[in-house]
Image (tube, rainbow, N blue to C red):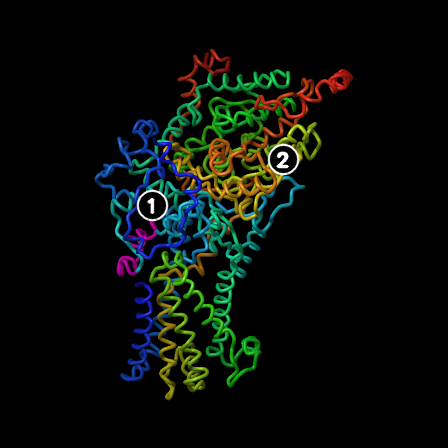
Amino acid sequence: MGILFSFSVVVALTVIAFAGVGIAGMQSFFGVVIPYLAVLVFLVGVVLKVLKWSRSPVPFSIPTTCGQQQSLPWIKHSKFDNPQTTGQVIVRMALEVLLFRSLFRNIKTEMNDGRVTYGSDKILWLAGLVFHISFFTVLIRHLRFFAEPVPAFINIIDALDGFVQVGVPHLLLTGVLLVAAGGYLFFRRINNSQVKHISLPADYFPLLLIIGIALSGIIMRYFAKVDIVSVKALTMGLVSLSPRIPDGIGVVFYIHLFLISTLLVYFPFSKLMHMGGVFLSPTRNLANNSREKRHVNPWNYDVKVHTYAAYEDEFREKMKEAGIPVEKE
Amino acid sequence: MAKEAEPTPEELVQVDYEAPDKDWTKTPAEFKKGMYCYGSRPAYLESVGFPNAREWSPNDEDWKLPENWKEIVLEAMEERLSKYRSFRLFMDICVRCGACADKCHFYIGSGDPKNMPVLRAELIRSVYRKYFTIGGKLLGEKAGARELTVDVIKEWWYYFYQCTECRRCSVFCPYGIDQAEITMVGREILNLLGLQTDWIGGPVANCYKKGNHLGLEPHAITSNIEYLTDDIEEITGITIEPTFNRKGAEILFVTPSGDLFGDPGTYTAMGYLMLFHELGLDYTWSTYASEGGNFGFFTSMEMAKRLNYKIYAEAKRLGVKWILGGECGHMWRVLNQYMDTWNGPADFMEEPVSPITGTKFENAKGTKMVHVAEFTADLIKHKKLNLDPSRNDHLNVTFHDSCNTARGMGIFEEPRYIINNTCNNFFEMASDATREKTFCCGSGSGLNAGENIELRMRGGMPRGHAVKQVQEKYGVNMLANICAIDRAVLPPLMNYWAPGVDVCGTHELLANALVMKGEIKRTMDLRLEDLPGVEDDDDDAENNENSEEGGE
């Protein structure tokens, strides 16, 4: 149900953009108004969300320790799985954010001949990493549409991305990898009964949307080619806040742009916020040094306690009889 | 009759991990006998001032929820969303990648999809979406939102008490989402509705008034320890006279009360007594702060803080320099990650220094509380103990990392160092079942009751199988650990999954190997069982032994 629903929404979005531009001729609406609104919603939404998170304090020091603590000097400390200092936390976070360290640990649990067994399972890590790195590279590559002249590093990334030198224009690998990895993640969602069981429309939809964005981009570059000079004129117009709609840009471009706009609007309200959230996760971004330095809870309050005096009052005679010293004879 | 109805290990391993096609939001929890605890009797809740105490049973159709239960739940959620970044964030950022799904011992042991950590979290997340997010309010089901109903409350109760807050899922989560955080909030909310379990409610009430979970009154503590010192005298010929509530002692020793009461925990307590005596340590026990563990931690943060208060209060009253803590799992999660924040700063004490080796425990200079395994490992490293590991030669030992000390602290090497120096035969379990990936005993976080035994055996299945493997491969017959709950619950678990494997604390192994000044020849271990091999060469060796002893 969630699958069909999510798929239908992405198709509907495509049809809307197609009809809006191809039939109704609403180039300005889809090329200028929607993108501006989308960027606005994205920026404000993300900032508000992060502010909302940060307004909730971290009352306790709760890192998940995944290695040996720092204790006696002769015991080897697992610095990056159980950080004791801020520097070590930064390395732990970098490993997490850049290399998906935790996902790399993944193992598969199975029941074989009545015995629980474990096997290596790195494919989710690999697919996830390829998906994110590809997406990020594609994003960086697209900066060429928003800068004139194109910065050198973007040309270098382009060259690297197209190193296989197949086809005209050169095939850019990350685009293909993005679709392939996204496709695998989608396949996994419907093929693995456990993952299917937990999946929501909110899981299928962004995945299909991103695949749709990548596919429309690929179609534009290799098949239904659009006038790239006009596209750049449009995007430069957007960033320089003097928007204009050049003639002769194919409708595929508007579909691409509309799907991206949808993603931007959807982003702050969805699980995609894990991009920001991962940095704030208290089980990862805190040092395990709460025995060394006091972690302060801003809302710590006094509680009702059972004092020693009350305890002794209740048990004084028994304590005396047992030879336990008391405060009041 | 009841006994016969309990499933056999062969039946229990028939677990199917294929998740059903059915929508889980449309499948209310089915309460299976043996999988949940009794509801708390009202007296327990009343004695600590928990709200909505009443006679109540999970089997009843009507849970007699307070009239405004929905309001209570939603207000409590809102309050916790604003108080805990963990809770707020973990509601928002899960991508349901499923990496945690097959990491939970309860899921592995039951195949119940709602025991996948991600889904256990979704039980509350779905309600969060409905009442606290724009998408959920507008789109409802399509956004994964669902209405808060009595069935949902029952489902929360059933599944938040099928989570031992072990944090294994959190190790594998790419964002570190910790189901323990969510379970803790879930239980706090249920607690506001008076939905406590009897097995947790009792120890909390006991601990609050009497100082320990078992409800041992002061004279019972001293007499229990006297039994232990009597046994020690029989075994070693050495008389030990520990002190209680003694002002001016250098060190306050705090350990879980379970170790004063039941086997095999008592052998670990004997180990402490023997070690401290041998060192001539200036320390005291306390009858007031007579509990290291904290069942309050399984009800609410506030209750946990109220119980934890006694440790620092007693340290201050007695004027000790620092505190030494015994072997226990969740006790150390609390001491490591919460105590100083709740009840600190402990500036009335001094930075802990071992009086024997002069080692400064820099990592504990804030809380002033040292783990006994750190303390003992340091002694061994500095060769301050005369150890004869051959006394443990009849034991093939493996080590169970407890969840809380593993993933809420990271004390892995210290206990292993102790075992390696006190035993000649030590074998590790599979690496996917130890250290940060260790498996729960299946009975942590207050689930060590009797009526939920099937749940415990299911939850302990992965641990049981891992032990079974080293039993078959290396002849392992002893499962060492540093947790009092482990010592209480692993014996039945081993009987079930790996019969023939016994359970002990590391300080039992240590005390068996410890050659004490002036001791008689050891013929018995701490369990008063004959030491294998000793009887045989008794006659031959007697003269030699005697002359050696005499020479000193």
Bounds of the magenta segment: B123-142
Residue B552: % across, % down? 76, 18
| Most common SS among magenta residues | helix
**In this view, B512 is above or below A159:** above
**In the current view of this chain or complex, which residue is farthest to the bottom?**
A248
Residue B283: % across, % down? 58, 23
Q: Which residue is mark 2?
A: B419
> Is the residue at mark 1 from the same chain as the one at mark 2?
yes
The mark that comes first in sequence, 1 or 2, is 1
At horizontal 35% and vertical 67% (from top left) the residue drawn is A265
Res A207 seen here: yes
Q: Dot 1 lies on which element? A: helix
Q: Nearer the viewer, residue A224 or B128?
A: A224
Q: Which residue is mark 1?
A: B79
Residue B139 included in the magenta stretch of the image: yes
Residue B257: % across, % down? 48, 26
Label 2 Cα neighbours within 10 Å, binned few <14 / some 14-19 / many ≥20:
many
Q: Chain of mark 2?
A: B
